[in-house]
Amino acid sequence: MSSQQIRLATRGSELALRQAGEVVDTLEDRRHDVELVEVETEGDRVTDALISDLGKTGAFVRALDQEVMEGTVDAAVHSMKDVPTEVPEDLVVAAVPHRENPADVLVTPDGTDLEDLPAGSVVGTASLRRGAQVQAHRPGLDVEPIRGNVGTRVEKLLAPALHREHERRTEAEKEAQSRDAREQRRGDYTADIEAGVENLDTEDGEKRAADDGDDTASSSEFEQSVTEWFDSLTPLQQSAMERDPDTEYDALVMARVGLERTGLLHHVGIEELSTGTHVPATGQGALCVTARRDSDVVDTLRDALEHVRTRVEVTAERVVLEELGGGCIAPIGVHALVQGDTIRTAVQVFSQDGSEQVGETRELDAEQYATDARELAADLRDRGAADLIEDARTEA
């Protein structure tokens, strides 16, 4: 079997590289020679901005697709949720690989569930949709924005408790060292007496002994020294110790797949949130490989990577989103699931504070799901979704 060389563009973040790596592995299994080309996008340059603050869709996509259209690379790998519903005419979605779990998760240091978070707890998220869903479900919680990639956000969550533990251990170690020093002085004084040393200031000596009388020779309450404790931490925890976040978060809401792909899922406590009450973003968990429409690599990518069921599901979701017209400006969740001859599609449109919601779950006919998806979106618009989206656009 002959080999075909493919130049594949990707963002340079850890998550993007891992996603692209999955595509590379599949292509190489088909004996294709693949070269990854890292490309910086607008979303990468504006590192302190929330996705919703960028003001437009495609911030993580356009630079990669421009390289494709100019012929610098053959194809580009994207997170499907980042891809605008309007794809340039010269491009085609060549392949949609199998989608991973699209659910969101609540992330806490100890695995506390959303229902059990105390009122007033601070929940961090970079998504308008996730924030609105949390406030709709638990209005007593405080939702705050959080910036950074997956690892950065988790480190910001873990940092405050680790800093407090470090301070507690440091103080205990200092106290133990102080007790040891006093005990040493007491021992020296006793030795001097026993040796018959003359001209000691008896009154001062007695005062020192009285001052030290209540002290004990016990060591620190911790078995490990501060250095040993730090060395025992995971690399994630050690990295978190270097952070001094402005906001102390009690929990985060994130995409499960991001934690899985970065290898962090088992380093934090999580609760998987129901896709019924916390409907994911359009295309969440899925990847997308774009190529020039006239490129001979399109068939190669489709043959190696395409997962038909995922293509149908994300297409239904994107049709709904396109008809609603919300993009990443409004809190919108759309999730489709193929079930036999129907596509069960859930849609949620929120006000930014989660106090208002328009939503529905509907079975779409698999034979005409695109038409049915447009009808679903149109019905939701007429029932108030259009007003919520317009309000969100105005606020943005």
Image: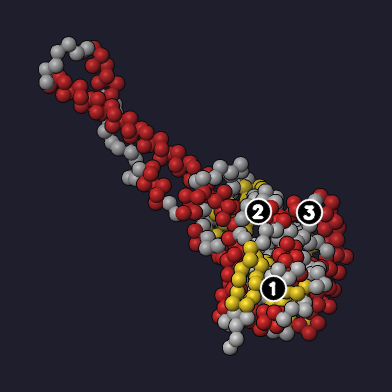
Lower position in the chain sequence, tag 1 or tag 3 = 3
Residue at left 84%, top 51%? 394
Mark 3 lies on a secondary structure that is loop
Question: Spatial distance from mark 2 to mark 1, Cα to Cα?
Answer: 34 Å
10 Å neighbourhood of mark 3: few (<14), some, or many (≥20)?
some
**As displayed, is residue 46 above or below residue 202?**
below
Residue at left 81%, top 82%? 368
Q: Any mark on residue 74, and which?
A: 1
Question: Spatial distance from mark 3 to mark 2, Cα to Cα?
Answer: 17 Å
- The mark tally for this picture is 3
Q: Percent position (x, y) of residue 100?
A: 61, 71
Question: CB under 8 Å between callouts 2 and 1?
Answer: no
**As displayed, is residue 391 above or below residue 379?**
above
Residue at left 52%, top 63%? 263
Question: CB under 8 Å between callouts 1 and 3?
Answer: no
Mark 2 lies on a secondary structure that is strand
Q: Percent position (x, y) of residue 372?
A: 82, 77
Residue at left 23%, top 16%? 205
Q: Which residue is mark 3?
A: 55
Amino acid type of disc 1?
Asp
In the visual, does 391 lie left or right of 173?
right
Question: CB under 8 Å between callouts 3 and 2?
Answer: no
In the visual, does 217 lie left or right of 99?
left
Residue 381 placement: quadrant = bottom right
Q: Any mark on residue 125, and which?
A: 2
Mark 1 lies on a secondary structure that is loop
10 Å neighbourhood of mark 2: few (<14), some, or many (≥20)?
many
Q: Residue furthest bottom?
A: 1
Amino acid type of disc 2?
Thr
Q: Nearer the viewer, mark 2 or mark 1?
A: 1
Q: Percent position (x, y) of residue 309?
A: 68, 80
